Amino acid sequence: MLRALAITGAVLLVGASLSIGAADLWAGELDAGLVVAVSRLPRTLAALLAGAGLALAGVVTQLALQNRLVEPGLTGTPEAAMLGLLGVTIVAPGAALMVKMSVAAVAALAGTAGFFALAAHVPRRDPILLPLVGLIYGGILGAAVLWLGWVTDLLQYVGAWASGEFSGVLRGRYELLWLIAAIAGAMWIVADRITLLSLGEDRARSLGLDYRQTLAIGLAIVAVAVAAVVVTVGALPFVGLVVPNVVSRLWGDNLRSNLPAVAALGGFMVLAADVIGRVLRFPYEIPAATVFSVFGAAVFLWLLHAPLAARRG
């Protein structure tokens, strides 16, 4: 019954995404098939892929750091990707999109690795401390991005990368996100190894895991997924926080069995945020990142409070 409701809801959500927009498909003034093929369908697929990628990146981050209150947006990863994007825009503004994504992925990898190195020195007794450190770390990187964008007169680019929205997605301008499908396949192969990261380095090594190699694979997955999303549609905060926590509370921490649920829930939650953003001020739009941030921030505050309540109880 629950599965049937979920499938029905997903179909209705996709139908709403294909139908809702400034152009009226039913008025007969436009070629409805062309509008759907060029704009509505790519936008829907972009939202699904971006949400799935960020949710998968979030679950890897949480398992690797052994903390349910962190996600790529709280480890400086999007800000590092933006810094790389800004650098390649300054040095080679005409570079191909794949080149920009590659530079952003390398920068995101370096930024995420920097946070992981910092996290090794953060006491783990209080789970709230690590995300707070991540907020400060991301804020420092974000300030560097804003300063560099200001001195190079590229703040309009920074604004576009920082506010994830799908209004500019068209056929031919979102296909980079299909890398996320390859990432999901790679995660399926190494899912059991990534799950063992949640046990900590000593226990994982005692079970025969090459801890550093697996951690490097996880960091690469996070960096590529976040870079692809930032380059294509911009940053979408809290997706990697909310979705893994929901799935973990329902089905546990086995990444291999949860992988489809994490990807599907992430994709459809971002698509729902995009549809809501289109409806709230129709025919104008509110960025999906803004809509999801309101919901995600509430969940984040609840998660921050939950450990305190548990300890007091």
Image: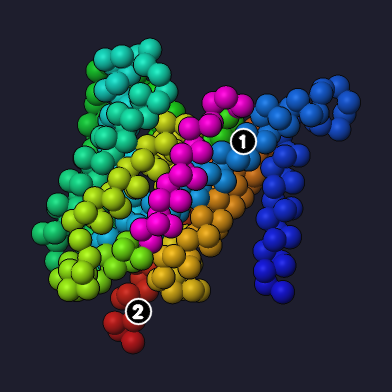
Magenta stretch, residue numbers: 170-191
Question: Would you place residue 157 above or below residue 196 in this image?
Answer: above
Q: Residue at x 54, y 26 (%)?
A: 173
The x, y position of residue 254, in whole percent, is 41, 70
- Any part of residue 293 in sight: no
Question: Whole-Å distance between the Cαs marked 2 and 1?
Answer: 41 Å
Indicate yes or no whether the magenta region holds residue 186. Answer: yes
Q: Amino acid at mark 1?
A: Arg
Residue at the extreme bottom: 313
Which residue is tagged 2? 309
Which of these two is toward me, 143 or 88?
A: 88
Instruction: Provide the secondary structure element on which disc 1 rests.
Output: helix
Which of these two is toward me, 153 or 5?
A: 5
The x, y position of residue 92, in whole percent, is 31, 14
Count of residue discs:
2
Which label number is shown at residue 130? Answer: none
Q: Residue at x 25, y 56 (%)?
A: 214
The x, y position of residue 209, in whole percent, is 22, 65
Q: Residue at x 50, y 50 (%)?
A: 52
